Amino acid sequence: MKVVTDDGVTGVGDATLNGRELAVASYLRDHVVPALIGRDPARIEDTWQYLYKGAYWRRGPVTMSAIAAVDTALWDIKGKVAGLPVYQLLGGRSRAGVTVYGHASAATVDGVLTEVARFVKDGYRAVRIQAGVPGLAGVYGVHIGPGVYEPADAAVPSEAVWSTVRYLNHVPSVFARVREEFGPDLRLVHDVHHRLTPIEAARLGKSLEPYALTWMEDPVPAELQEGFRLIRQHTTTPIAVGEVFNSVWDCQRLVTEQLIDYVRTTVVHAGGITHLRRIFDLAALYHVRSGSHGATDLSPVCLAAALHVDISIPNFGLQEYMPHVADTDAVFPHTYRFEDGFLHPSEEPGLGVDIDEDLAARYPYRPAALPVNRLEDGTLHSW
Ligand code: CS2
Ligand code: MG
C-alpha cells in the first residue's frame, strides 16, 4: 500500500495476508482509505486508535493487517519528513545488526546437512531445521525445489497428509546429526507448525533437550493457551509462538505468565510498527524476546519495517529471514542488506523500501491458498 500526503511525501506499508489477500485489499479500499483522506499524516498514534477503536469490530488478521499497512506507511512518511531512518525515531540502535536465521530444509537428513553447511559458509549464526519425514510424501517447511518455498500453490487448497507418530519418531535423529556435524554453538530453531497436542509437544521438547534449540516454534495450535503450561512443566526447550497472533491481547497471557520465550508477531499481521512495539515492550517485562516471522509471503516492505524495530528494541531475540526471489526484490527496491549473519536496516530517511508499481503491474494477482492437512485416516488436522 502507498499513502501520499498533500506535500507529496509517499509512505509504503505491507498488507499481505497469505491466501486471503483480497479481503485486506477490500478492507483498505472500501472502508479505510475514504476515512484517511484529509487526516494529518503526522498523527500516527491517533490514526492507529481511530482505525482500531473506530471500526467497533476489533482485531483479527484482516483488520490488523489493514491497520498495519497504514501505520507502517505513516512511519515511513514521518522518517522521510524528519530526514531520519525509522529506527532513529524508535530510540536508535541497540545492537550492531539484526541476527537472522535461514531455512535449512530438505527431504533427507543429508540434504539438510548440505543446506546447513551453505548457511554456515554464508555467515549465518542461526538456522531453522526442517526435514522430510520417512513415510510422508511432503512436509510443511521443506522447500519444494531449489529456491522455491511458497506453500500457497493453488486457488483451491492442495491437501497434505500428516502422521504425528512418524514425525515424533524422526525429528530427534535429524537434530542429532546436525549437532554432530556442526557442534554446539550454531543456534538452531525448529517449527512444529501447530501440529501437536500439549503432551506430544512436551515429549518433543524433552527429546530435543540434548540439542539445545534456541526455540521450538508453534508446538500446538495457540487458541488453548493453557496448553503451554503443560509443555512448560515438562521441558526446558524454549518456546516461540505468535506468527498468527494479531494483537497484544493474543500475547498477554502467554507473556505475563511466562509460558513462552519468544514472541513471533510481526509488523504486517500485528497492527504495524506502533502495535508491534507495544507487544515487545510488554514482552520485555517478562523475559520474553522478539522472534519476528519473516517468511517470503511477508513482503520486503514488512521486512524493512521489521528491521527498524529489531535494531532498536531492548529485547530482540532473532529475526526470520527467507530472502525473496529476484523478481520480488525488483518490485520492492530496498536498501537493507545482509552481512555476516546480520541484516542491517536501511540508513535512508524512512523505511528505505519502495514499491515499483509499473513493474508490479506485470505480475497480475493470482489466487493461491495455503494447503490443508489431513491425518493418514483422512481426519482434517492443523496445517
Ligand atoms: C512459517 C511460515 O515461516 C514460518 O515460520 O510458519 O512459512 C508460514 O507457514 C507462512 O508464512 C504462512 O503464510
Ligand atoms: Mg512458523
Image: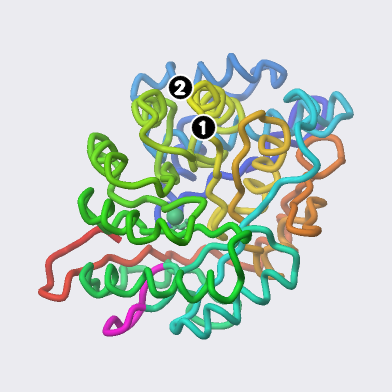
Tell me the tag on residue 52: 2
Q: Position of residue 360 (x, y in %)?
A: 67, 61
Q: Is residue 37 magenta?
A: no
Q: Position of residue 232 (x, y in %)?
A: 31, 40
Q: Amino acid at mark 1?
A: Gly
Dot 1 and dot 2 residues touching (CB under 8 Å): yes
Of helix, strand and loop, which one carries label 2?
helix
Residue under the image location 49 percent in, 79 percent down: 106
Q: On the image, numbered disc 1 is attached to which residue?
A: 271
Q: Amino acid at mark 2?
A: Tyr
Q: Position of residue 298 (x, y in %)?
A: 56, 53
- Whole-angstrom CA distance, mark 1 to mark 2, is 9 Å
Camera-side residue of 72 and 167: 167
Residue under the image location 64 percent in, 34 percent down: 72
Instruction: State left or right for residue 352 relative to residue 38.
Output: right
Where residue 159 sits, quadrant-wise, is bottom left
Instruction: State left or right for residue 99 relative to residue 134.
Output: right
Camera-side residue of 343 and 189: 189
**Where are the magenta residues, as a range?**
133-140
